[in-house]
């Protein structure tokens, strides 16, 4: 388990991280979500032992980063946002070099190499120069370097940044497989990636944790009105304007007319579903309904509300 307590990191007068607290449990893929500059990379560099905190501490089980930095580094695998690869080296050579850093040599290295080749799907590129590998395979090589010593904790900073959709799917599946027996912290500003990969999400804004929970829990925390868009034919403005008085809780937000079509936007509380009543009112008024679609808030809305951006709302 990873436990972060009251973590602070200052660069001169700049407060990059401000008293962060959260945990990542064994066998959990934790999504670390925040806008660029929110403090994600700084936090992960401290957890990996790359940076020292200004104050606070990081615990891996019973070890703390201040007193046991070397022991913790042996238990942590870290793939930074800028993948540390040397293009002139072959994949085999860079894995052997990384293994030697962890004192993995001889038969131990052969076993570790077989394991990461299988886990990361590197059979086809093992003897290629890294510069000749695709971006997707370079990320696989970076992951193999991060897990060559079979760490309990895996930290991935923006692991799909710059990949095409097919490569993203491949890396996502690889991360899920690794997450079966490791604690993984994966940072990103790509909302869909965190939602598709993580078991739990921690949202950080301006160096502070502003939310912690599953995607469903974060969604449930976002309250407000729902927006319903209705496209109808053969309607009169006078009849449309009767909707709020006929159906309790509705507010007309906008009405636009194009020839014989009206597009109506209706606000209503999130705990109310007026679609059946709106449908019956339309039939009674002899409208032809061409579209009825509620706007459903998603993780992007949660993120925007937590980071101070404007959210589509009623």
Image (cartoon, rainbow, N blue to C red):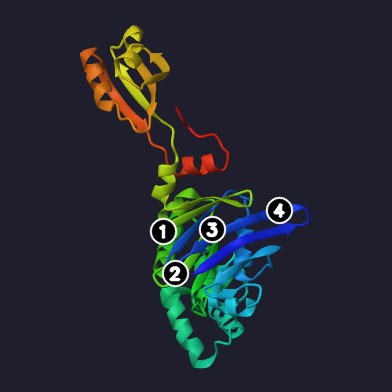
The answer to which of marks 1 and 4 sits earlier in the sequence is 4
Q: What element carries label 2?
A: loop
Q: Are marks 1 and 4 in contact (CB under 8 Å)?
A: no
Of the two numbered discs 1 and 2 on the same chain, state the one appearing first in sequence: 2
Few, some or many residues within 10 Å of mark 2 (<14, 14–19, 20+): some
Q: How far apart are marks 2 and 4 (CA)?
A: 30 Å
Q: In front of the other: label 2 or label 3?
A: 2
| Disc 1 packing (10 Å; few <14; some 14–19; many ≥20) | some
Callout 1 touching callout 2 (CB < 8 Å):
no
Q: Is mark 4 on a helix, strand or loop?
A: strand
Determine the secondary structure under disc 3: strand
- Relative placement, left or right, of 165 versus 100 is left
Disc 1 from disc 2: Cα separation: 12 Å
Tell me the number on the disc at residue 305: none
- Using the numbered discs, state the Cα–Cα distance from disc 3 to disc 4 in whole angstroms: 19 Å
Return the residue at label 3. 187
Asked whether residue 261 is in view, the answer is: no
Displayed quadrant of residue 146: bottom right
Q: Determine which residue is flagged by label 2.
A: 26
- Identify the mark nearer the N-term, 2 or 3: 2
Mark 1 vs mark 3, foreground winner is 1
Q: Which residue is drawn at 60% across and 69% down?
A: 48
Circle 4 residue: 15
Locate residue 175, reporting x and y percent.
44, 65
| Of the pair 103 and 47, the residue shown nearer to us | 47
Which quarter of the picture shows residue 155? bottom right
Label 1 or label 3, whichever comes before in sequence order: 3
Residue for badge 1: 199
At 30% across and 19% down in the image, what residue appears? 247
First-in-chain label (3 vs 4): 4
């Amino acid at each position: 388990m990873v436990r972060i307590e009251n973590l602070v990191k200052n660069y001169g007068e700049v407060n990059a991280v401000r008293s962060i607290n959260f945990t990542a449990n064994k066998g959990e893929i934790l999504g670390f979500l925040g806008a660029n500059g929110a403090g994600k990379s700084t936090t992960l560099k401290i957890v990996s032992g790359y940076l020292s905190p200004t104050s606070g501490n990081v615990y891996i089980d019973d070890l703390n980063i201040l007193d046991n930095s070397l022991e913790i580094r042996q238990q942590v695998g870290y793939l930074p946002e800028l993948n540390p690869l040397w293009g002139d080296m072959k994949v085999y050579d860079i894995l052997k070099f990384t293994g030697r850093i962890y004192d993995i040599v001889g038969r131990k290295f052969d076993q570790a190499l077989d394991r990461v080749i299988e886990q990361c799907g590197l059979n086809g590129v093992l003897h290629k120069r890294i510069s000749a590998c695709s971006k997707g395979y370079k990320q696989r090589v970076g992951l193999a370097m991060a897990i060559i010593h079979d760490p309990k904790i895996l930290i991935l900073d923006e692991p799909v940044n710059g990949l095409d959709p097919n490569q993203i799917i491949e890396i996502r599946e690889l991360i899920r497989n690794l997450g079966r027996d490791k604690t993984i912290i994966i940072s990103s500003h790509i909302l869909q990636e965190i939602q598709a990969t993580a078991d739990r999400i921690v949202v950080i804004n301006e160096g502070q944790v502003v939310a912690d929970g599953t995607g469903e829990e974060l969604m449930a925390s976002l309250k407000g009105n729902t927006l319903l868009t209705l496209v109808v034919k053969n309607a009169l403005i006078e009849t449309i304007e009767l909707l709020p008085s006929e159906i309790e809780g509705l507010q007309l937000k906008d009405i636009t007319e194009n020839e014989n079509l009206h597009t109506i936007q209706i606000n209503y509380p999130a705990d109310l579903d007026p679609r059946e009543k709106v449908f019956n009112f339309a039939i009674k008024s002899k409208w032809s309904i061409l579209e009825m679609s509620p706007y459903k808030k998603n993780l992007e809305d949660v993120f925007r509300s937590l980071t101070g951006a404007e959210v589509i709302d009623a």
